[in-house]
Amino acid sequence: MVVRIRLARFGCRNRPFYRLMAADSRSPRDGKHLEVLGYYNPLPGKDGGKRMGLKFDRVKYWLSVGAQPTDPVERILFRAGILPPPPMLAMAHKGGPRDRQLIDPMTGHPLDIYGLTIVDDPNAPDGENGASIEKTA
């Protein structure tokens, strides 16, 4: 049995409200679940922010036993600080093929992997980290 951590939709039309659930991957979206792990309200509140609440210890438990989060849940857990940033790929245009260029999750801009410079370790002796050793005569 593969356990997924996913969102179950509640609320009425045009006013969605989601619960974070641990459920069997074969069960329907709003069907049988194993445990409720939190909630997520995407509609802005009076302060203008989206609201979410998580049971951190239970989410960490389910992740430790091998539960797989869905993509939206992975983004929510990243914002909560439980998971590292998910890999993001840039799209050339809507509905088109995806580029294989990684996106920085904090800024949304493409990462320039080729423009990165590797800094030599200042604590390593000369010659160990690819630096050339100059000989003096």
Image: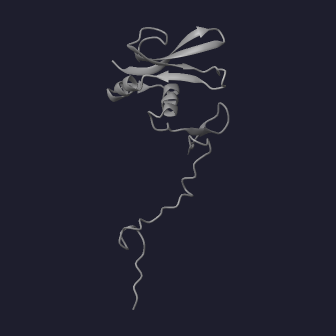
Q: How many numbered callouts?
A: 0
Give the residue displayed 57% in from the left and 14% down from the top. 17
- The image's colour scheme reads one colour
Q: Whole-percent x and y of residue 51?
A: 57, 22
**Residue 3 as seen in the image, left or right of residue 114:** left
Q: Whole-percent x and y of residue 4?
A: 41, 21
Could you tell me which quadrant the C terminus lies in? Answer: bottom left
Q: Whole-percent x and y of residue 97?
A: 61, 36
Could you tell me which quadrant the N terminus lies in? Answer: top left
Give the residue displayed 60% in from the left and 21% down from the top. 42
Give the residue displayed 36% in from the left and 20% down from the top. 2
Give the residue displayed 37% in from the left and 67% down from the top. 123
Tell me: residue 134, above or below residue 122: below
Residue closest to the far front: 47
Q: Whole-percent x and y of residue 87?
A: 50, 39
